[in-house]
Amino acid sequence: MTRPDTTGPDLTRTDMTWQRTTRTGRTRQRTTRPIAAIAAVAALAVAGCTSEGPGRARTPEPLPPSAAQPGGTGIGQPRELVTGLQVPWAIAFLPGGDALVTERDTARLLRITPAGRVTTIGTVPGVEPGGEGGLLGVAVSPSFDRDRYVYVYFTAASDNRVVRLRYDEDLGRPQPIVTGIPKGGNHNGGRLAFGPDKMLYITTGETGDEPLAQDRRSLGGKILRVRPDGSHAPDNPFGSRVFTYGHRNVQGVDWDERGRMYATEFGQNRFDEINRIEKGHDYGWPEVEGTGGGGDHTDPLLTWSTSEASPSGLAYAGGSLWAAGLRGERLWQVPLGRDGSAGRPVAHLTGTYGRLRAVVRAPDGSLWVSTSDRDGRGDVDQGDDRIIVVPLR
């Protein structure tokens, strides 16, 4: 069975059983990257890079929820900024400090101030929501003060695509810059982010068609890297838009202060991942899940048992990565060493707000976190969905 990322509205009876208890088995054999400690205790495990170099996993250990907060960085008292949203999928900040927020199923692009005032900028034309597809990622041009460009990723009639629009007081006409990304009922990827190199990074899923992840001619199951006009970056590894491949469904990306790139990824039945993203690397799907890829594939930086994660958005702040958990219903903090290795993770907000989708570092240093309880797989409470402001201390 192809495991959904637990983000879409359609659940079979098997999916509902899996969501509330455990994931079902696969329909065919594939190599499983072994992590014995996780299998034994069904607990979170760390698989960071050692001094022996990438691809070597250190011995994992079970982590209690009371683990000390690393590096002196913890969270302050969260506060609800906005309520009553409908599956807010992505958040990106404008130069003045307001945020742009996408709603997956309504195709609305919202503007939200740090004081919580919500304005609907417009509805993006051409969006055809369905399953895990719809209006997904958003990114603001690094040169927004000059060019006024906003970029969005969405599911259209025949594909997933990236368009850019001029945003002054209203949205301009969408200009497609990357088309032909495979679409499906699930695994549509959809995160957009400009990197330190001012290139646009696009995460895609394999839509349940697993071989696409290894096919470098396909845009599915990849991280793409393009110029702001959508053409491939000139130093990409394969002379195309493809930057890395062998991905199942990448949902979050960010960079640390040294320019190292990280990404969250949904596994299938056993292990969800954070990966250190390096140019031209193959991250193994569908041949492997978790660690143990050997010389042909790049191991994750860190893996979780699937019941604790389904990691979506990712942000770097205060020396740590912060990953939003959908099925795990928690905000994971992963401290990073000076060499980019993963320290001992800590869970925050466990079960407090339900399913967590996006997490972004705000200009004031806090984290903005969106919930995803109205996506068809959460328990909807009054006020859902929300954006939560989480101060760091």
Image (cartoon, rainbow, N blue to C red):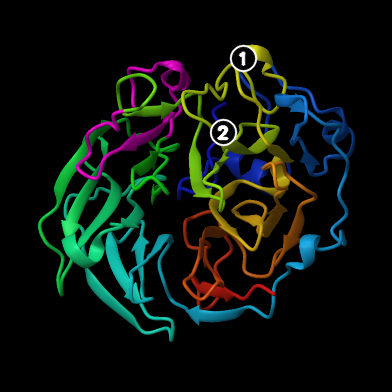
The answer to whether any part of residue 238 appears in the image is yes
The image shows residue 340 at horizontal and vertical percentages of 67, 43
Query: In the image, is 167 to the left or to the right of 373?
Result: left
Give, as a three-letter code, the residue at label 2: Arg
Q: Which mark is residue 119?
A: none
Task: Name the residue beneath numbered marker 1.
Answer: 28
Task: Determine whether 229 is above or below 141 in the image.
Answer: above
Question: What's drawn in magenta, residue-wise?
Answer: 205-234
Mark 1 or 2, nearer chain start: 2
Q: Which mark is residue 3?
A: 2
- Residue sitting at x 30%, y 20%: 239
Most prominent secondary structure in the magenta stretch? loop
The percent position of residue 49, horizontal first and vertical second, equals 73, 33
**Kind of residue indicated by mark 1:** Arg
- Which residue is located at x 41 percent, y 29 percent? 243
Instruction: Sort mark 2 into few (<14), some (14-19) or many (20+) by Cα contacts within 10 Å.
Output: some
Counting other residues with Cα less than 10 Å from the Cα at mark 1, is it few (<14), some (14-19), or many (20 or more)? few
Q: Secondary structure at mark 2?
A: loop
Corner quadrant of residue 317: bottom right
Q: Is residue 220 visible?
A: no
